[in-house]
Image (cartoon, rainbow, N blue to C red):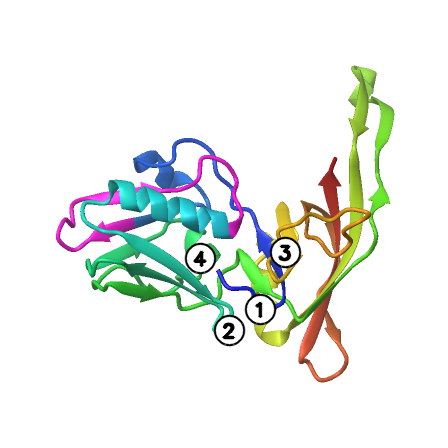
Amino acid sequence: MADNGPQIMAYCYSEGPESGASAELNANSTMMTIEQATPGTTDYARPTEPELFSDQLDTIRAEWDLSAPAGLYSFTYDDGARRLSVQSENSVAFRPQMSGTSAAWFGFTQDLSSGWATDWTAASAPAGVADLFAVEVAPAEDAARVDLAEYRHGRAVATVWGNRQVHRVKLTFRSSTKAQIEAGYLTSGRVRIWQNGDSTVYSATNVDGYIDGWIGAAGEITEDGDVGGLWTISLVVGVAR
């Protein structure tokens, strides 16, 4: 995937086997391929654990390459067009298939119930990644805690603890990206926020590295200025140590 500035990317949710019919049941991690020459065969693929959107695409491609009858595949995300494309590398006509919320996650919101092609491009921007106009990340705050908690009706007492740091983050994005943010995948669960695909993690000595953590709180999406061109949202991101 190309990188054109700041970006936020979500982790898909996944559990269970990587392939097979049971993989279809997963919420937003599965994509299937049906090849025209063997329409009775559906090849399912998804990660065996939560993965970044970009890593998830690599996992699906590798599984299709291994198990699909004839195809070798590639996935391309175009930052400018904000569209995901899936191609057959050896000109095999096929049809991608998704169930549940997978279509919105990948952006393939068009009708995929018929037709065959060697190259498919999503009709919408994927909900699992968004390109940002700007991002502000506050220095890490210490959020480690140890408490003694008494649960309902006094029936149990337990030690509650955590060891994490917290970043207060402000995302600024164009109006064309608003629907991706509103879908919710980028404001809940686990995300990564980075600049130009920086592969180094944030630290006290590397303050421009990526942060990778869980959304603890998300504010309202608000208009930045009075022309509707830019929007902002504030997040609290907890990073485990």
Residue 30 seen in this snapshot: no
The reply to whether the magenta stretch includes residue 47 is yes
Residue 159 seen in this snapshot: yes
Image disc number at residue 198: 3
Compare residues 69 and 107 and report the one nearer the observer: 69
The reply to whether the magenta stretch includes residue 142 is no
Say whether marks 1 and 4 touch (CB < 8 Å): no
Judge the density around disc 3: few (<14), some (14-19), many (≥20) Cα neighbours within 10 Å: some
Name which residue type carries label 3.
Asp
Observer-side mark, 1 or 4, equals 1
Q: Is residue 54 left or right of residue 200?
A: left
Judge the density around disc 1: few (<14), some (14-19), many (≥20) Cα neighbours within 10 Å: some
Residue 83 quadrant: bottom left
Relative vertical location of residue 19 with respect to residue 52 in this rendering, above or below: above
* Residue 43 coordinates in the image, percent (x, y): 27, 43
Q: Which residue is mark 2?
A: 80
Name which residue type carries label 2.
Gly
Please tell me which of labels 3 and 4 falls first in the chain: 4
* Residue 77 coordinates in the image, percent (x, y): 45, 63
Say whether marks 3 and 4 touch (CB < 8 Å): no
Name which residue type carries label 1.
Asn
Name which residue type carries label 4.
Phe
Which span is picked out in magenta? 33-53
Q: Is residue 26 left or right of residue 120?
A: right
Q: Which residue is mark 1?
A: 4
Say whether marks 2 and 1 touch (CB < 8 Å): yes
